[in-house]
Amino acid sequence: FLTEEGQSYYLDLKDIFHALHEATDKLVAKGEKGAITVALQTSFAIQWLVPRINQFTQINPDIDIRIKAVDGDEGFLTDDVDVAIYFGRGKWPGLVADKLHTEYLTPVCSPLLFQGDKPLNKLDDLSKHVLLHDLSREPWEEWIKHFNVLGVNVNQGPIFSHSMMVQQAAALGQGIALGHSVLARQEIEAGRLVCPFDEKLIVKNAYYLVCHQSQADLGKITAFREWLLEEVTADQIDQDFY
């Protein structure tokens, strides 16, 4: 029980506590509205997030979402960004990271290649086709080495600076690309790309949703995090190729 002095002290402070509680409630309520800026790579934005974003706005009409396309991440959030989707190992100082998709690579190509005179029945048949490269030849080198594919020259084939260009070239029948499980899904479901083989190589990096630790519980950020994680869960249940 409070002492006499404590009871008197409480009566003097209770209005202050009540005002503090009201101010906190107003701050949280304010955080559930307004604008939220999401930064992410262009390829992930166009091929995964943008087709779903209207679902978020329907559920959260008071939150004005703004998509900011970036070439990559620097391990920290700029002042004009609330949350971001990074591709990496999941450890960034001062940031909360929720893992989204595990990424793996598998060859993808146009169905047109099966109508040509070059076979595509076994892994060694890759040596008879043009390889399409995303940024560098290293991913194909790792994939070929991991599955011990013989006779393939990974030093041939064009190099593109963007995954969307690689996928477009593959869809046009210009060669075989290494499809990213998340980014290639839309093209595969549309039938513009197919997977000639079952072999898949899991990559060390993955997609993560990140935000500042100090803002992780802010209403609008919580709403976006919860919605995005639900979308990822549903996405993983639906996938059979990926």
Image (cartoon, helix red, strand yellow):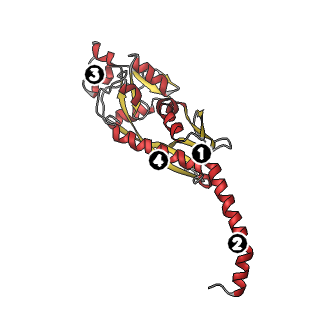
Instruction: Say which residue label 4 marks.
Output: 99
Label 4 or label 1, whichever lies nearer to me, is: 4
Q: Residue 14 carries which label?
A: 2
Asked whether the beta carbons under mark 4 and mark 1 sit within 8 Å of each other, the answer is: no
Q: Residues under labels 2 and 1: Cα distance?
A: 44 Å
Q: What amino acid type should be assigned to the residue bearing mark 2?
A: Lys
Q: What amino acid type should be assigned to the residue bearing mark 4?
A: Lys
N-terminal-most mark, 4 or 1: 1
Instruction: Say which residue label 3 marks.
Output: 120
Q: Which mark is residue 75?
A: 1
Q: Residues under labels 3 and 1: Cα distance?
A: 41 Å
Q: Please, is residue 79 above or below residue 2 in the view?
A: above
Asked whether the beta carbons under mark 3 and mark 2 sit within 8 Å of each other, the answer is: no
Q: Residues under labels 4 and 1: Cα distance?
A: 15 Å
Q: How crowded is mark 2: few (under 14 residues within 10 Å), some or many (20 or more)?
A: few
Nearer-the-camera pick, 236 or 57: 57
Label 3 or label 2, whichever lies nearer to me, is: 2
